[in-house]
Image (cartoon, helix red, strand yellow):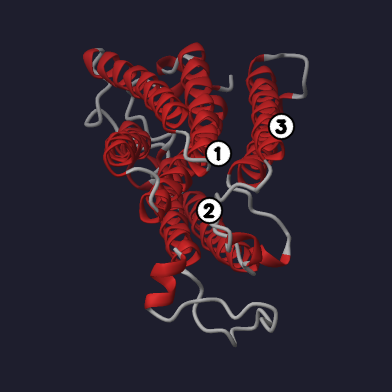
């Protein structure tokens, strides 16, 4: 954003590159990839041509891919040396998100399975 | 930035710079968006707790309506496209703001806000029709978790729209000063992050939730 900016060792997350064409092209590529992945996700969810039990996993994979597209093309998170701090912070965030979600889902499903003695009282998932 | 940085002793060393911290703290144009990036990541941690809650309670419908009965994939597709286009146009606004183009920056920001408002309007319509059908947040644990998760995202979008309006006014009144551009960059990080969270919401809540 100033003449000094090109000399900097680090870049801020979300800060675009310097060349206007490459900037716009990056956003357009990101938009196209995101639209394609969204389209595939909605198609996968509504088609009957695919193996049913695998669809949920496939949708999660598509979502993670689209999040990657957003990070790279919209937030400009790269593997370059000027992005080390941004990537490390992201890695820590992803670690915590992973621990919270997988840990909770894993523990709660096991608790659910271990509380079959009185399903109408203790089974959290089936509580009516 | 140069004069501002020089006045507080933050000018860059130049060629002897090793990138290993010998030159002192980074300039504000790096530190501020980086700090905001940390905030956004901790916001994602907050959402991960809400996602975990939703995943745990998704079958606890208390005999009430299930995800399959409630959600319309067509509405969600429109919402998704609106928010994605909004995120894209926000990026264009950053590109033009960097080149101090007042007209196009304001046009792209206005379009960002309008697309965000379309998203929010559809979401409120969905919430309103669900509550009208008796599927409000107090109906079952599943619906409490749903309204908390999706409502929290909607509240973020609302806050983002207010922030966007403030940024448009500040750019108009103060011009493309460094501190204004920093704020605008932070807004764009926030807006892109909301779209990333929406990807998780439409996949987990609306697509996986409505699989037969």
Chain letter of mark 1 equals B
Question: What is the distance, in whole Å, between disc 1 and disc 2 at their CAs?
Answer: 10 Å
Mark number, residue A29? 3
Question: What is the distance, in whole Å, between disc 3 and disc 1 at their CAs?
Answer: 15 Å
B39 relative position to A57: left or right: left
Most foreground residue, B29 or B138: B29
SS class, disc 3: helix
SS class, disc 1: helix
Q: Position of residue B41 (x, y in %)?
A: 47, 57
Q: Check disc 1 and report the residue beneath it.
A: B95
Are labels 3 and 1 assigned to the same chain? Answer: no
For discs 1 and 2, the disc positioned in front in the rendered view: 2
Please say if the residues under marks 1 and 2 sit with CB atoms less than 8 Å apart.
no
Please say if the residues under marks 2 and 3 sit with CB atoms less than 8 Å apart.
no
Q: Check disc 2 and report the residue beneath it.
A: A1
Please tell me which residue is depicted at 72% across the width and 14% down the height of the picture: A48
**Which badge, 2 or 3, comes first in the chain's sequence?**
2
B80, above or below B43, in the image? above
């Amino acid at each position: 954003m100033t003449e000094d900016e090109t000399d900097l060792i680090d870049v801020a997350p979300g800060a675009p590159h310097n060349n206007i064409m490459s900037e716009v092209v990056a956003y357009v590529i990101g938009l196209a990839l995101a639209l394609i992945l969204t389209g595939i996700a909605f198609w996968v969810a509504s088609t009957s041509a695919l193996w049913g039990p695998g669809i949920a996993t496939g949708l999660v994979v598509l979502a993670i891919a689209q999040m990657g597209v957003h990070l790279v093309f919209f937030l400009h998170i790269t593997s370059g040396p000027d992005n080390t701090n941004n990537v490390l912070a992201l890695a820590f965030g992803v670690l915590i998100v992973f621990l919270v979600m997988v840990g909770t889902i894993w523990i709660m499903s096991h608790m659910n399975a271990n509380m079959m003695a009185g399903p109408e009282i203790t089974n959290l998932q089936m509580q009516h | 930035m140069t004069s501002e940085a020089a006045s507080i002793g933050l000018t860059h060393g130049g060629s002897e710079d090793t990138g290993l911290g010998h030159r002192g703290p980074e300039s504000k144009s790096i530190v501020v968006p980086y700090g905001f990036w940390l905030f956004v990541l901790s916001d994602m941690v907050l959402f991960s707790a809400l996602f975990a809650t939703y995943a745990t309670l998704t079958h606890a419908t208390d005999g009430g309506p299930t995800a399959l009965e409630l959600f319309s994939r067509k509405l969600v597709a429109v919402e998704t496209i609106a928010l994605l286009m909004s995120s894209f146009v926000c990026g264009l606004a950053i590109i033009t703001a960097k080149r101090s183009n007042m007209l196009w920056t304001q046009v792209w920001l206005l379009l960002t806000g309008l697309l965000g408002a379309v998203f929010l309007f559809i979401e409120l319509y969905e919430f309103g029709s669900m509550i009208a059908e008796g599927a409000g947040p107090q109906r079952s644990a599943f619906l409490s978790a749903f309204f908390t998760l999706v409502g929290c995202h909607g509240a973020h979008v609302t806050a983002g729209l207010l922030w966007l309006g403030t940024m448009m006014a500040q750019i108009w009144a103060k011009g493309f000063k460094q501190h204004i551009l920093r704020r605008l960059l932070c807004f764009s990080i926030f807006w892109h992050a909301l779209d990333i969270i929406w990807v998780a919401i439409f996949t987990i809540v609306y697509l996986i939730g409505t699989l037969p």
